[in-house]
Image (cartoon, rainbow, N blue to C red):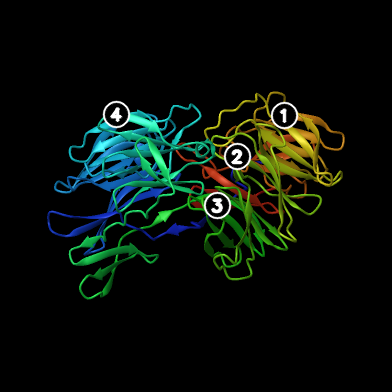
């Protein structure tokens, strides 16, 4: 088969999701008298970050692109000097937009590395604090002067990487930093003295996750860890005390209260005196969403999900229409996999390792359709569904951030019950599962890695067979000795298992319980989920994506080769394809950044 594109037509089907809604953080007044409402703009993973200002009189948009500073998050505040302050980029750095000169100034990098960070908080003295990953570092910008400061690593424990979700500052100028997610800590930092202290007591500081903190109307900081609420003090907490977060003053543009931009691109303004509402058409273009998964077909519709937020979508192959279904997975961030069964569409989502079921023939109704079936405690990522030989759904999971040890989860599609087997292989994540109907078993793969920032303790991963009737592991093997991460495994029509181990693939006979072949893949940079769920075409090819190519493993002789290449799968400076699905007759659907693509493969 040819590996050029002469026999392959790659089609752009469109953007599954574009989010037009926009909320604002504050309003400033231009020297010419008009008002600007400001918002942070982030197209997650797509390396598109900007400071956005919208004129409330004309709807004109000021889009100050910050993408050149690297892929990261963005947080903004109105400074004590009346200017706009921004923390963005990778590594994160502070910027100041001067209202009078209408110029953006790069104030510099406070700490490096800093590629994921909290929303930030500003104290009454005008200092703007932000906590970052991966060194749990606290940085600061004085919005009176623009001076940038690196306060340093807050946590002492080497297993802690995050200050998350956000810091809070009390009116007496103490900064409170929730540290996690390996376990919960809460640190106080007093700028006047430089003192810092971990104030969350046992047993709260042994729980996995992170705390939440906020500043209340009384100027004090309160927090919550697990189900305990408390008042924060520089050297301790007072359990049982709480108060609502301080309300933000209304955003005012003269005598108008500024609302949000809706899904039609209109900005809402409300007259403070008459309550009259006006809608201003804006130039705001909206945000694209990164296509994370493309998973299955049901009644001619191709289903998938975007990431951060995890809005599901489908593409109608008859009408060519794209439909944004909104956030369906209870994990909210992204749906790892969607599988079509007679009982409905089952979704596995991150964070929290949630399971939801959607009846696509009925209207979507919050809390009713889809229904949340539950989650796996202490786990985050349910990677890929497998329909087992017993008619049950299975998936492996990766644990929460900073933790080791995944689980095997089973869902009964009939009664919607769930069962979980914790850590079948100690200190390893359970990645992928494939059915072995001949023996009533599952073929499972593991990885030594854990949740984000976890430090592995094992040196090699493994595969194992799970007896679905007796609910136990019955065989363990290492097809490619020394492998640290066994990836996707697919059952061929010949009953053999075709699996990945880094840049190597192997063929495993589950009945003989032996590895019968290993070889090198023709690609290196694999694209999630690396192999299609089922064999495709007359020859039952095992199809995957990697580098800039569609590749396959041919069960006829266990060889691997390239089927086609295209820059939408991978090209310099681009993240490339993520999420794909191949129909039984060889039609490939895949996400390429924010776009859904299609190609009829020559099989």
Q: Earlier in the sequence, mark 1 or mark 4?
A: 4
Which of label 3 and label 4 is nearer to you? 4
Please state the horizontal and vertical placement of residue 270, each as a whole percent of the image: 26, 70
Pick the residue in front: 539 or 16.
16
Marks 3/1: CA–CA distance: 37 Å
Marks 4/2: CA–CA distance: 35 Å
Which of label 4 and label 2 is nearer to you? 4
Please state the horizontal and vertical placement of residue 349, each as a whole percent of the image: 58, 51
Please state the horizontal and vertical placement of residue 146, each as a whole percent of the image: 21, 37
Q: Circle 4 is placed at which residue position? A: 194
Element at label 2: strand
Element at label 4: loop
Label 2 crowding class (10 Å Cα cut-off): few <14, some 14-19, many 20+?
Answer: many
Image height of 296 relative to 404, above or below: below
Q: Circle 3 is placed at which residue position? A: 331
Label 3–label 4 contact, CB within 8 A: no
| Label annotation for residue 519 | 1
Q: Circle 2 is placed at which residue position? A: 399
Element at label 1: strand
Q: Earlier in the sequence, mark 4 or mark 2?
A: 4
Marks 1/4: CA–CA distance: 58 Å
Label 2–label 1 contact, CB within 8 A: no
Can residue 1 be seen in the rendering of this structure? no
Quarter where residue 489 is shown: top right
Label 4 crowding class (10 Å Cα cut-off): few <14, some 14-19, many 20+?
Answer: few
Left or right: 25 as drawn, with respect to 213: left
Residue for point 63% across, 66% down: 360
Which of label 1 and label 4 is nearer to you? 4
Q: Earlier in the sequence, mark 3 or mark 4?
A: 4
């Amino acid at each position: 088969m040819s590996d050029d594109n002469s026999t392959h037509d790659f089609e752009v089907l469109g953007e599954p999701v574009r989010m037009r809604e926009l909320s604002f953080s504050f309003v400033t007044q231009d020297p010419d008298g008009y008002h600007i409402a400001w918002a942070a703009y982030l197209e997650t993973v797509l390396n598109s970050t900007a400071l956005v200002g919208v004129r409330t009189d004309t709807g004109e948009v000021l889009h100050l692109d910050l993408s050149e500073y690297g892929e990261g998050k963005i947080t903004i505040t109105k400074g004590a000097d009346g200017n706009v302050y921004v923390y963005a980029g990778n590594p994160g750095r502070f910027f100041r937009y001067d209202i009078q000169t209408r110029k953006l100034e790069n104030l510099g990098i406070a700490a490096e590395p800093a590629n994921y960070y909290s929303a930030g908080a500003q104290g009454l003295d005008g200092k703007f604090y932000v906590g970052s990953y991966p060194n749990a570092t606290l940085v600061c910008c004085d919005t009176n002067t623009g001076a940038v400061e690196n306060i340093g690593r807050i946590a002492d424990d080497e297993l802690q990487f995050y200050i998350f979700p956000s810091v809070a500052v009390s009116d007496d100028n103490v900064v409170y930093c929730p540290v996690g997610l390996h376990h919960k800590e809460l640190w106080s930092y007093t700028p006047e003295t430089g003192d810092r202290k971990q104030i969350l007591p046992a047993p709260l500081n042994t729980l996995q996750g992170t705390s939440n903190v906020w500043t209340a109307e009384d100027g004090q900081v309160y927090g919550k860890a697990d189900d305990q609420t408390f008042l924060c003090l520089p050297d301790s907490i007072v359990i049982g005390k709480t108060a609502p977060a301080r309300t933000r003053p209304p955003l005012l543009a003269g005598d108008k209260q500024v609302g949000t931009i809706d899904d039609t691109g209109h900005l809402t303004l409300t007259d403070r005196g008459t309550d009259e509402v006006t809608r201003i058409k804006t130039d705001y273009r909206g945000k694209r969403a990164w296509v994370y998964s493309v998973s299955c077909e049901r009644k001619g519709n191709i289903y998938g999900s975007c990431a951060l937020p995890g809005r599901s979508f489908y593409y109608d192959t008859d009408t060519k229409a794209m439909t944004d279904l909104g956030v369906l997975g209870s994990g909210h961030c992204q749906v790892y996999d969607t599988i079509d069964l007679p009982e409905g569409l089952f979704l596995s989502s991150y964070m929290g390792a949630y399971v939801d079921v959607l009846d696509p023939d009925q209207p979507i109704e919050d809390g009713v359709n889809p229904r949340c079936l539950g989650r796996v405690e202490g786990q985050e990522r349910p990677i890929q569904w497998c329909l087992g030989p017993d008619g049950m759904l299975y998936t492996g999971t990766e644990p929460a951030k900073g933790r080791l040890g995944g689980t095997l989860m089973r869902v009964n599609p009939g009664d919607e019950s769930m069962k979980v087997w914790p850590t079948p292989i100690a200190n390893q994540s359970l990645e992928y599962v494939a059915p072995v109907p001949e023996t009533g078993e599952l073929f499972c793969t593991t990885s030594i890695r854990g949740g984000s920032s976890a430090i592995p303790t094992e040196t090699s991963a493994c595969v194992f067979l799970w007896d679905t009737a007796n609910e136990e592991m019955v065989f363990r093997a290492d097809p490619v000795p020394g492998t640290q991460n066994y990836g996707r495994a697919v059952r061929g029509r010949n009953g053999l298992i075709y699996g990945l181990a880094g840049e190597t693939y192997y063929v495993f006979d589950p009945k003989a319980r032996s590895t019968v072949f290993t070889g090198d893949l023709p690609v290196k940079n694999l694209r999630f989920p690396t192999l299609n769920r089922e064999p495709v075409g007359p020859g039952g090819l095992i199809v995957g994506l990697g580098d800039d190519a569609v590749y396959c493993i041919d069960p006829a002789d266990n060889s691997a080769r390239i089927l086609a290449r295209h820059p939408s799968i991978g090209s310099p400076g681009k993240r490339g394809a993520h999420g794909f699905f191949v129909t039984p007759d060889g039609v490939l659907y895949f996400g390429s950044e924010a776009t859904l693509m299609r190609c009829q493969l020559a099989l």
